[in-house]
Image (cartoon, helix red, strand yellow):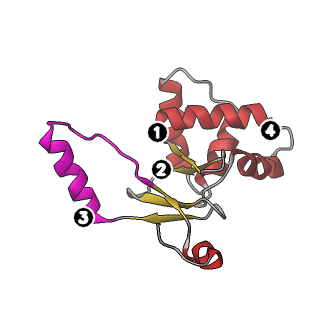
């Protein structure tokens, strides 16, 4: 079955944190691992309910919270009060640009930005263990429709 090693790693990690591992939680994790999209909790709920109509909204939200706290998913504020998630297992580090108009999310990686962050931290003796950079603004399409795209 696809994603089984990752699923077992998440199960072990959650059990180690004292979390219960139920069939619904396993379905939620398997479903989250099965997408490379940035999904909302409601998206995840709908996908899970295709396999098990009994999956509760509360269980999805609680599981996402636990997964985020454990570092298996990353939450991303969309600028409109919503949140989208993506699993972090097997993904190389990247940052995000979020369109405040249409909600599009663009992933990017810039080695120069990474180097500059390390230098800034080193100047004050700070050791970075993880970070997340999010840029909010307008995607090219929305900027064009608005008649410009500058700051």
Q: Residue at x 82, y 47 (%)?
A: 49
Density class for disc 3 (Cα within 10 Å; few <14, some 14-19, many ≥20) is: few
Q: Secondary structure at mark 1?
A: loop
Counting residues from the start of the chain, the first of labels 3 and 2 encountered is 2
Magenta span includes 128: yes
Mark in front: 4 vs 3: 3
Counting residues from the start of the chain, the first of labels 1 and 2 encountered is 1
Along the horizontal axis of the image, is 103 left or right of 49?
left
Q: Residue at x 40, y 58 (%)?
A: 94
Please state which of residues 112 and 26 is positioned toward the viewer in this rendering. 112
Q: Residue at x 76, y 52 (%)?
A: 47
Density class for disc 2 (Cα within 10 Å; few <14, some 14-19, many ≥20) is: some
Counting residues from the start of the chain, the first of labels 3 and 1 encountered is 1
Verify CB contact (< 8 Å) between mark 4 and mark 1. Answer: no
Please state which of residues 63 and 94 is positioned toward the viewer in this rendering. 94
Region rendered in magenta: 110-134
Counting residues from the start of the chain, the first of labels 4 and 1 encountered is 4
Residue 137, placed above or below residue 124: below
Residue position for label 4: 55
Counting residues from the start of the chain, the first of labels 4 and 2 encountered is 4
Residue position for label 3: 112
Counting residues from the start of the chain, the first of labels 4 and 3 encountered is 4
Q: Position of residue 30 (x, y in %)?
A: 63, 48
Verify CB contact (< 8 Å) between mark 4 and mark 2. Answer: no
Q: Residue at x 15, y 38 (%)?
A: 124
For the residues marked 4 and 3, what is the alpha-carbon distance in whole angstroms?
Answer: 44 Å
Residue position for label 2: 88
Verify CB contact (< 8 Å) between mark 1 and mark 2. Answer: yes
Residue position for label 1: 71
């Amino acid at each position: 079955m696809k994603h089984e090693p990752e699923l077992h790693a998440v199960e072990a990690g959650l059990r180690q944190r004292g979390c219960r591992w139920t069939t619904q939680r396993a379905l939620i994790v398997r479903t989250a691992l099965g997408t490379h999209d940035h999904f909302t909790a409601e998206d995840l709920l709908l996908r899970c309910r295709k396999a098990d109509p009994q999956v509760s909204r509360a269980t999805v939200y609680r599981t996402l919270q636990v997964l985020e706290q454990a570092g298996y998913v990353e939450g991303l504020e969309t600028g409109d009060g919503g949140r989208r998630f993506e699993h972090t297992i097997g993904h190389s580090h990247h940052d995000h640009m979020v369109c405040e108009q249409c909600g599009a999310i663009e992933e990017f990686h810039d080695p120069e930005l990474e180097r500059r962050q390390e230098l800034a931290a080193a100047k004050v003796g700070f050791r970075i263990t993880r970070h997340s950079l999010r840029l909010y603004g307008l995607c090219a399409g929305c900027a064009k429709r608005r008649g410009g795209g500058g700051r």
